[in-house]
Image: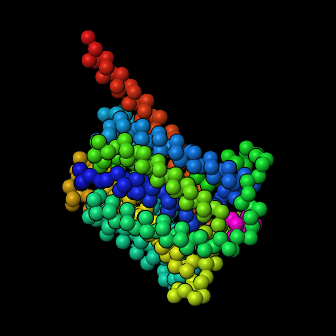
Amino acid sequence: MSGRISIGQFATMLTAAYVASGIFAFPRELVAHAGPEAVYAFLLECLAAFFGLWLWFRVNRIHPDAPLSFAPDLLSVWLAFPALILTLVLHVALAVVVVSDFAFVLHSFFLIETPLIVLQACVVLVAGYVAWFNLPALARTIQFLYILAIIVTVMIGLLLLPHITSVYAVVPTPEISLTPLLYGAYKGSYLFWGYELTVTLYPFLRPQDRAKAEKHAYIAMAITFLFFALGYVLTLGVSGPELLVREIWPGVSTMRLVDIGTFLINKLGLLLVTFWGLFVLTFVMSRLWCLAYDVSPLFRNFSAGWYRGMLLFFGAIVLWGAHSFPTPVQLIAFAQGFLVPTVLIFNFAMPPVFLLAGALQHRRAALRTSP
């Protein structure tokens, strides 16, 4: 065990593990596919995220002192090993998508002459450097960076309120069509990819803190709902639905309108986009740490040398994967075609399998001890 984390650090790390997955594209898919029902699709996504987190917390309680990434004592090896492989694949794929997406944003708006591989390498190297010092230092760094990024984003985002001209688009429609609502929620579900981090992170809580930590994680997720709700109102209200659905990164395009001529930095919106790099870094830090720890039970090796070797190994894989997408269009196609259904299956089908296995294990143990 590399050290315990506090309740606040747990809630912050868990939240930072999913914010970056959708901050640049939100709410394009919601508006494009749900149309007037986009706000209802967003609410459905929020409820689904709460439910998914609740499911994983139930799973965490089966073996609260050990990571569940490889659980042959809970599942048969024929189920445990595929579960581990799927966990690793998802961590890598999520990190790849976020690193690649952020590099495309930087390349398109700020550093046109800089090769993409350089931008991608910078993100992976910085994230790997922070994760190098293991969980206690990683948790403190994420807690500081994430909270700073949230505060700065809200403060600068509020400056967009005078630019809202499409109020009609923000007002929910009284008529609800179920099909576009569900389809929009499905296509936009990337907004909360990542809370499955609790599978690996939960054992690092002190036993007496775990119940309270879960409550704080729910509160942090609710605050995230409000954070994205503000982004929804600002982005859709400023851009309007017609323009928004044509933008690859609607949030970035909208924030560019924040311009204060008398301020030291007049292009304040562009400065904010660089602050969103903190969301990306905290996301990738968490993924690399999880990848290094998720394989440790399989090889029964938790040494510092092994951990750092795995960081280098998975960091190289993430960098290679991020550089495999030459255009944002191909990245979006991969995320929508592969990651959306895979993450949904992982978050809502895997927990019932673990819970069933835990119930059967408990029943077998009770039968063995009964007279």
Q: Quadrant of the C terminus?
A: top left
Q: Position of residue 343 (x, y in %)?
A: 52, 49
User: In this image, 290 relative to 47: left or right?
Assistant: left
> Residue 50, image x and y in percent?
52, 45
Q: Magenta part mainly helix, strand or loop?
A: helix
Splitting the image into 4 quarters, where does residue 328 fall?
Answer: bottom right
| Residue in the image at 63% along x and 52% along y | 42
- Is residue 256 part of the magenta span, yes or no? no
State the residue at coordinates (34%, 65%): 141
Vertical side of 71 occupied by 109: above or below: below
Query: Is residue 237 a member of the stretch shown in magenta?
Result: yes
Specify whether residue 102 is in view. Answer: no
Instruction: Name the side, left or right, on which 266 lies relative to 81.
Output: right
The quadrant where residue 104 appears: bottom right
x and y percent of residue 321 in the render?
Answer: 46, 64
Residue 180: image location, x then y, percent: 72, 49
**In the image as oriented, which residue stretches furthest toward the right?**
175
Q: Considering depth in this image, is 292 or 67 the residue closer to the camera?
A: 67
Q: Residue at x 46, y 53 (%)?
A: 220
Q: Does residue 232 lie above or below 152 as drawn?
A: above
Magenta stretch, residue numbers: 236-243
What kind of colouring is applied to the model shown? rainbow
How many numbered tags mark residues here?
A: 0
Q: Residue furthest top?
A: 371
Q: 18 or 321, which is in the foreground?
A: 18
Q: Viewed as shown, does residue 234 lie left or right of 204?
A: right
- Is 356 located above or below residue 156 in the figure? above
Residue at 51% of width from left, 88% of height from top?
264
The answer, for residue 123, to whether it is visible in the render is yes
Q: Nearer the viewer, residue 343 or 181?
A: 181
